Image (tube, coloured by chain):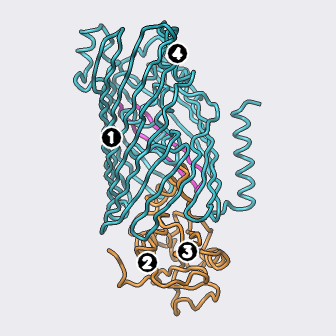
Chain colours: A cyan, B orange
Amino acid sequence: MTIRTFLLLLLAATSWLTCARPARAFDYQVHGFASQAYLVSEGNNFFGDSTNGSHDFYEAALNGSVVLGSGLLASAQVMLRDAGLTDTGRPRLDYALLDWNALQGVNSSAGIRVGRVKNAMGLFNDTRDVIFARPGILMPQSVYYDGAGLRGIFFSSDGAQLYGSTTLGRHELSFSINGALDRNFTHKERAVLLGGSPIGAFVDDIRVKDLAFAQILDSYDGGRLTFGLSHARARVDVDPAPGIPIDAELKARIYVASLRYNAERYSVTTEYMYTRSESRSNFMGDSAGASDGGYVQFDLRLNPKWSIYARYDATFSDADDRDGSQAAAATGADRYSRFAHDVTLGASWKPDAHWGVWAEVHRIYGTATAPALDNPDGAEDERWTLLTVMAAYRF
Amino acid sequence: MGLLALIAWCGLVRAGSIEIITSTDHAAPGLDRAMVRAIFAVRLREWPDGVPVRVFVLPDGDPLHVEFCREQLGTFPYVLRASWDRLVYTGTGIAPEVVANEKEMRRRVAMTRGAIGYVSVPDRAPGAGDPHTQARPVPAAMDSR
């Protein structure tokens, strides 16, 4: 039995148990979900061999929380996800934390979470792998990039999170600050970063240092309007193998601005991300650059079961070279690989509180968001189309 | 209930209003709208005496829930659901428990320590229906908005 089958069976069994004895939100809660997608594309691959039709995109999670009293809450979630070659389908501990809500009042709240904690960045980073809690089957890649295979660094980190909120008139202001322990890249992350590069032989460890996240949110008028600013920073150090005189370091700083307007029947969401990175090494010289991108999405709730949405998402590998022409002139790179403009139309159907079905079609110009791992010979078609459907169950 | 459902289904405006109900062990005064909002947003997890708050709600599409969200919390059911989903999938709070109907709501709130929920007000005195639950309209004078 594969791990995937085992987890789906476990999910089914837990679901049956909690249905037999309804999931109580008393001193504990148990929830979970499973989703399966099918993708078919023309031009380039996205999450598997999608040009021939791919079902290599699924997600499942099982989570639980227990109230321990005195403001203490313990929670954990096991998740598995497969997404072409960009994710493994193997179960991982997504979060496991102890939350101490030390200060609790009607208008203010503050506390600390310790353990493996989800990182807040933008409106959706901490729930991006849950179809029921994200804005479509595929995330807007400008802000929630999935192609690199290094996404795990950003989801959750071992460390601590300080959080707090306060109410000022009709504004609810909240913040969170995460500090992560330094850690080494896993074998998988190393392989993704270095690929088949001969540099791998000279590298002992690749270490993520000083990883930190900060976010402030202003939720106005019961969530009618939400404004957020997020920041993340990290340093990646290369420790050379003994006797190898290489020295390399990468610094990245990410900024995200978010705005969402919620009306009764419709929502408008827009986010913009700016990433500044600097690399320094004694064998390739120093370099610095900035990438950016953003999206705007319109959601219309036709009735309690049916919604439709439209999104425009633009991603630029170099904020100073939006059509890739400078990169093409300087290095001979394929200029279409330096940007992507993605127009998405989608619909969702939620017949009850447990089931959901989504469908969306993407028309994309540029290949910056086509995962390199799924397109080993390079993404060749600068104009490509992607159709995907996903069905999901939760309890 | 059948009549209520029929009326709601017909899309008529119901004459009744909404009452917040709590289990009898938490009859503390001062349950104003700000506190109700903090509780249903799961920002306030414990009563002043330290007992965990246990929140009960009707299904997202239930007309009374829609009215409760709009009138008492000043928000929409889908916005509230999104905030509860975030709690569940980030492990940062216990989401309210969904009960099937008002009868179940009264029963569960009455038998659960530290419980809070809401019911529609029929044309009779608030709180006169169920001796085990304490019904309290939220005082308009304490509305923080």
Residue B26 falls left or right of residue A138:
right
The x, y position of residue A237, in whole percent, is 43, 22
Image height of A144 relative to A365, above or below: below
Which label number is shown at residue A204? 4
Write the residue at 40% across / 45% down. Answer: A309
Residues at discs 3 and 2 in contact (Cβ within 8 Å): no
The x, y position of residue A60, in whole percent, is 62, 40
Q: CA distance from mark 3 to mark 1?
A: 37 Å
Q: Residues within 10 Å of mark 4 (few under 14, many from 20)?
A: few
Query: Label 4 is placed on what type of residue?
Result: Asp
Of circles 1 and 2, the one toward us is 1
Element assignment for label 1: strand
> Which secondary structure type mostly characterizes the magenta part of the structure?
strand
- Disc 3: host chain: B
Query: Label 3 is placed on what type of residue?
Result: Gly
Question: Residue under circle 2?
Answer: B13
Element assignment for label 2: loop
Q: CA distance from mark 1 to mark 2?
A: 43 Å
Q: Residues within 10 Å of mark 3 (few under 14, many from 20)?
A: many
Q: Are discs 1 and 4 both within one chain?
A: yes
The x, y position of residue A135, in whole percent, is 44, 44
Residue B44 falls left or right of residue A253:
right
Image height of A14 relative to A341, above or below: below
Element assignment for label 4: strand
Residues at discs 2 and 4 in contact (Cβ within 8 Å): no
Question: Residue under circle 1?
Answer: A256
Give the mark nearest the N terminus, 1 or 4: 4
Query: Label 2 is placed on what type of residue?
Result: Val
Range of magenta residues: A342-362
Of circles 3 and 1, the one toward us is 1
Residues at discs 3 and 4 in contact (Cβ within 8 Å): no
- Disc 4: host chain: A
